[in-house]
Amino acid sequence: MRQFSPQYCVDLSRERKASYAWKEKLEKYLVPAPDCDEPSLQTANKLLKLSEKLQLHPIEVGDLHERVERAEEWIEKLKKIFIKKGCAWSLKEVLLPRTPENASLTVKDIKERKKRNKSTDDDIDADDITDDMLIDRTARKGPCKLQTMEKQELEAIKNIRADNKKKLECENSTYCSCQRVAKSTMFPCDLCGEWYHTLCHRRSLQKVELCIRCVRSRRPNLNQVYPLLTELASIGLHFEESEYLQSLIERVISWQTNYKCLISNLSRNSERNLARATNLYLEGLLLEVSCDDQTFLYEAIKEKWPDIFMHEPPEGAFICDETKTPNRKRRDKDADLPRRLQNPRKKNKGTRAQIEPESDNEDDDEDVEDDGPCAAGQCKRPDGNKVEWVYCERCAKWYHMFCLNVNPKDVRDDPDFVCSNCQIIHAAS
Ligand SMILES: [Zn+2]
Ligand SMILES: [Zn+2]
Ligand SMILES: [Zn+2]
Ligand SMILES: [Zn+2]
């Protein structure tokens, strides 16, 4: 039998008070004042934590638990649709337009972010909850703010594109994530217009080619995203992800409207139409949701304003035009991927996979793989795992590591690799 000590009664009344206070907060929260936001997920989470701390009866908590669970499941679904494995961007970032800072991150920055991104979830501790925190502070980004962000994003990418275009006119410009001169086969990013060595990066072979700096998400189709929008209505909570998704979809729809407007005026090949087409083209690529109209626009542009696409490679390089490759071959290339990828990805900037000279005979792909122009005096024509390439900084030539008789491990850690020939010349002078 429990003794009803005075202390127990004090505790009991204190507990009661706390639970009443909590209930009051819950009510206030579920029926927000007219000028307030709808209930937010963040606050719901705080209330739940607090209810656990107060050991409240499940009846008192009501369906709050369920709502939070449904919202969190929804966010997970959204993540699955949008976010690639090992992505450098958070879901919120992907749903919002790029900030100019994010748009101009270097490949190195992005790789750093990928590493960092693994542990960013901040957990709220129930003890940290103060009454003050229950006030909904979700900073809503109003439509005005978002429109400004969208404009800034478009401006930022236009500037980057202009800079990349300018580089093509200078003789010793460097390109790609490796920051080397134009060489061998290269391909452009459809969005930023930077050129990449096929030795350093593999083409995605998607309808549009977005480089490592420009790609942020899986770019799901609008049809994939719509069901999630409908589901949102039944959750009855407000949270940033839902708000950002809605504004992203609004942006896609307004893009579609502008696209239809352009297409209906297409017969007039005016300067104004070109500017509009360029803007639509770029904004279509910036959007993290794709739609069929985007594909139609690219087709129309290819026909009418081919110059919008980058198709003149920098001097000294060939364009890597995978569109010429028949489908069968593409699949072969994908099957071939692990081995091809191993080399360039693992190596640092001193080393590359093989050079693929432009070949008229695409069917010779396998042979080309093992038969590149190795600069070694007596190329031993290695094959299989032995095909690893290294670039000599001094004579600017590519060698099989096997032919130079160097250990791949040593070479990988040496960004300024110099071949044995150059070492001899250097030692003699
Ligand atoms: Zn490169
Ligand atoms: Zn790019
Ligand atoms: Zn060789
Ligand atoms: Zn050399």
Image (cartoon, rainbow, N blue to C red):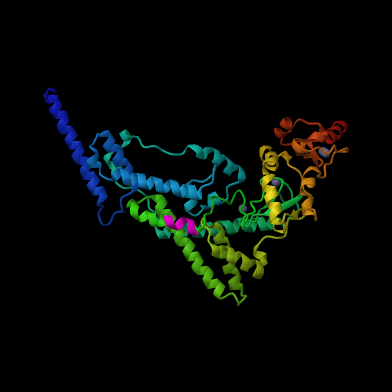
Q: Which residues are magenta?
A: 222-227
Please, which residue is most extreme toward the bottom here? 268
| Residue 178 in sight in this render | no
Badge count: 0
Which quadrant contains ligand 3? top right
Residue 206 position, x and y percent, is 62, 55
In depth, the one of 38 and 133 nearer the eye is: 38
- Residue ID at (56%, 76%): 265
Determine the image quadrant of residue 345: top right
Q: Main secondary structure of the magenta part?
A: helix
Residue toward you, 331 or 263: 331
The residue positioned 51% from the left and 53% from the top of the image is: 98
Quadrant of the image occupied by residue 164: bottom right
Q: Is residue 302 visible?
A: yes
Residue 42 in magenta stretch: no
Residue 133 picture location, percent across and down: 30, 42
Q: Residue at x 19, y 33 (%)?
A: 15
List x then y, in percent, for residue 332. 70, 49
Q: Is residue 39 left or right of residue 306?
A: left
The verdict on residue 224 being magenta is yes
Name the outermost residue toward the front: 328
Q: Please report the residue visible at 47 percent of the width from the left and 61 percent of the height from the top.
A: 251
